[in-house]
Image (cartoon, rainbow, N blue to C red):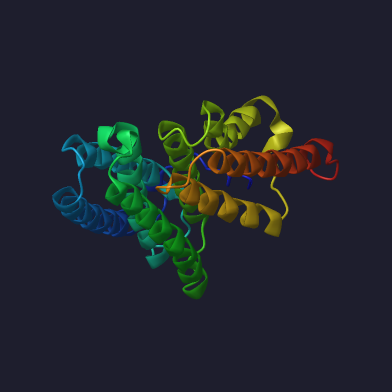
Amino acid sequence: MTALPEMSEQSPGLRPDAGKLLVSTLKALCCAYGLSVAVWAVAALHLPIELHVPLLAALILAVMFGFVLYGLPNHDHPRFGYANLVTAIRAGLVSLIAATILSSSVFAAHEVNLLLWSVFGATVLALSLDGVDGYLARRFRQQSRLGARFDMEVDAFLILMLSIGCAVLGKAGLWVVLIGLMRYAFILAQWMLPKLRQELFPSLRRKIICVVQVAALCLVILPGFGQPASGMLSALCLALLVYSFAVDTIWLLTRKDSAP
């Protein structure tokens, strides 16, 4: 669990370089969108997915990019940057994964191992690129609140979709979706408890548990990995996540050296 970067209410029009940033962002997002559509087209030709799956993926990605444009005032650089471009490409992969899990009857039937392996491969690729965008942001000194938030939201959405996938496949009970919903519940709690909006201290624990969640959920959706092992592994992931959220929540609520 990580604290959410604060998103300002500043209008992009107030920045002297707003036009240059907007053009750079639109170019990057259009490139990422075009590449994603090309990948989806190849997937539709070689995988047993229905036509509406890439169409839903296109809608999901458009919504994600809409939020990116809304958050541009939180990007402190004149260009969108290579790191955010990689994150946008990851968002394209996650959109297809989400559309497949949410709307494909073939995935729900889990009778076609090729589709399950493809979702696994796309997830591994998205997870691998997660390290690339962070490196590029540091390498070119393009860290920003927008980049951190964009990367975080893509990861959180991927975990939510994988947890739903585990439930759809019957690899665990409906409770497994709590793994993906817990962070969104924390966001909701921030609205009611201002102290939870404070910045958290850096933690290797959070990073490790996040990676463990994605890796474990990837393993659970694989063909041949079923109950009771899948349920036990999912329960372990949920327990680790509850522990991590509890530690950070208690720390935020009992912290006295900083105001919300």
Question: Which residue of the protein is positioned furthest toward the top in this rendering?
Answer: 192
Q: Quadrant of the C terminus?
A: top right
Specify whether residue 174 is in view: yes
Residue at left offset 50%, top offset 47%: 217
Residue at left offset 42%, top offset 58%: 124
Q: Compared to 51, does 201 lie above or below?
A: below
Horizontally, residue 246 falls left or right of residue 234, namely: right
Specify whether residue 17 is in view: no
Residue 236, given in percent of the width and then of the height, sits at 65, 43
In the rendered image, which quarter is residue 6 located in?
A: top right
In the rendered image, which quarter is residue 77 located in?
A: bottom left
Q: Nearer the viewer, residue 256 or 228?
A: 228
Residue at left offset 27%, top offset 44%: 112
Residue 38, given in percent of the width and then of the height, sits at 18, 55
Residue 41, given in percent of the width and then of the height, sits at 16, 51
Q: Nearer the viewer, residue 127 or 89?
A: 127
Q: Compared to 81, does 96 lie above or below?
A: above
Q: Nearer the viewer, residue 119 or 159?
A: 119
Residue 183, given in percent of the width and then of the height, sits at 58, 37
Q: How many marks?
A: 0
Q: Nearer the viewer, residue 235 or 243?
A: 235
Q: Compared to 173, does 218 lie above or below?
A: below
